[in-house]
Amino acid sequence: MSETLPRETTPPPRDTLARRLGALLRRPHVPAVAGWSVVSRLPVYLMSLATVLVVREQDGSFAQAGLTSALYTAGMAAGGPLVARRLDRAGRRPVLIVTGLLYPAALAGLAWGTRPGGWAQPSVAALAGIALPPANACMRSLWARLPLAETERDTAYLWEAILAEVLVIGAPLMLAGLMLAGSAALALTAVAALGGLGALGLALVRLPAGTDPEPSTERRDPIGPLRSPAMLVLTAVMAACAVPIGLLTLAIPAFVAAHGSPGGTGAVYACWGVGSALGAVWLGRSQSDVPAPVRLPRLVLAYALGTGLTLAATSQPLLAAALAVGGAPIALVSAVEMTLVGAVADGRSLAEAFTWASLATVLGDAAGQQAGGLLVEPLGPRGVFAVAFGAALAAAALAFACRPLLSRATTAAKAATASTDSTDSTAATEPECAA
């Protein structure tokens, strides 16, 4: 009797983040919206710097450059929720088309039609900030509305977090490359035009029925999504998590200047961003099976402990290593925050909810930078590292305290979605039963 040899079996392919992203990008409609959204977001991460460079190139003072950049940022902060509310009410297409045309026109006017010292340049800068196409809010609300599985949606938000890290590092490098080929004004105009083109492309992509919200004339609450207690505490956690980032933004260059050449600051910052992106790639898969309300406080605690690693740095290379290792959870924190915004926010105001979430992060970062600027001289960089560690631990404590509320909110949202789906299914089968 012949002996039966065991069959060779091929182990199933490992479910890596790259494989999950590839599967997501093969879904219908996803490549087009994801691609155009990347192009539309290029100006977000470098335009404040670009406006400073343009004003300086025009022989303006640092004070004039700072005012122009500050008013651009103030325009974004003030106009963002209003533009996003319009996006929720009127739909994606009209808002992105208008802002996609107005934004590059305003920045071209700032670069070529105004000069430092008058009222026109700061005014146009504020207008450009208000007219910034709401690509971040639009894309994140589309991820919440597109017909995707929950694991695919988690992958999409992780992609959003990684993309932010990549653009933070890559967009200024692109600006520097454009400036090598021409002036700062030309570089600003080119990037603004690319952003406007991306917004128009995102506006014109055809999506499945029901993905875009129905146009509405319903009167909305003045504070919109923040009326929800879960959304309010979530934005508070996001702001608290951003404060240590702002503190470190001031402490890092002070530390580098004290332990080496100030020219090394950019490389140290880059290690921070690279560590965050690699952390998302390495750890992202293991996080997807844990419910988001449970995942958030754990990740914020890991982020806090990573912030504490800066206290052990005694040289520029050690600080770079501490930031690379300690920054690993940052993109994951951002991704789970986006997942929770999409889960707890009212489906009729998703774009506005994501805008308030982004604004909370910006305000927390700004508060941290302000505090860091006041503390770096009396405490020194190591003292500010300690303050950042304490602030991150406080953010973790807040996240743990808010976990029950976020759990209840996400459970209620899933129940409401299931009820709606069941109702729609019943309505769809009634004509057949009647027949």
Image (cartoon, rainbow, N blue to C red):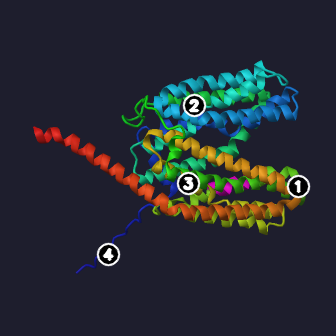
Q: Are marks 2 and 1 in contact (CB under 8 Å)?
A: no
Q: Nearer the viewer, mark 3 or mark 1?
A: 3
Q: Nearer the viewer, mark 1 or mark 4?
A: 1
Instruction: State the separation of the CA atoms marked 1 and 4.
Output: 68 Å
Kind of element beneath mark 3:
helix
Tell me which amino acid carries mark 1. Ala
Q: Which residue is denoted by mark 2 in the rendering?
A: 198
Please rate how many residues cluster around mark 1, counting C-alpha atoms within 10 Å: few if below 14, some from 14 to 19, many from 20. some
**Residue 257: assigned label:** 1
Q: Which residue is denoted by mark 3 in the rendering?
A: 233
Instruction: State the separation of the CA atoms marked 2 and 3.
Output: 33 Å
Kind of element beneath mark 2:
helix
Does 195 sit left or right of 310 as displayed? left
Tell me which amino acid carries mark 3. Val
Lower position in the chain sequence, tag 2 or tag 3: 2
Lower position in the chain sequence, tag 1 or tag 4: 4
Does 364 sit left or right of 59 as displayed? left
Does the image show residue 345? yes
Asked if the stretch drawn in magenta spans residue 271, the answer is yes
**Residue 5: assigned label:** 4
Lower position in the chain sequence, tag 2 or tag 4: 4
Q: Between 228 and 36, which is closer to the camera in this rendering?
A: 228
Lower position in the chain sequence, tag 3 or tag 1: 3
**Residue 10 in the image: x percent, y percent?**
40, 65
29 in relation to 275, above or below: above
Lower position in the chain sequence, tag 4 or tag 3: 4
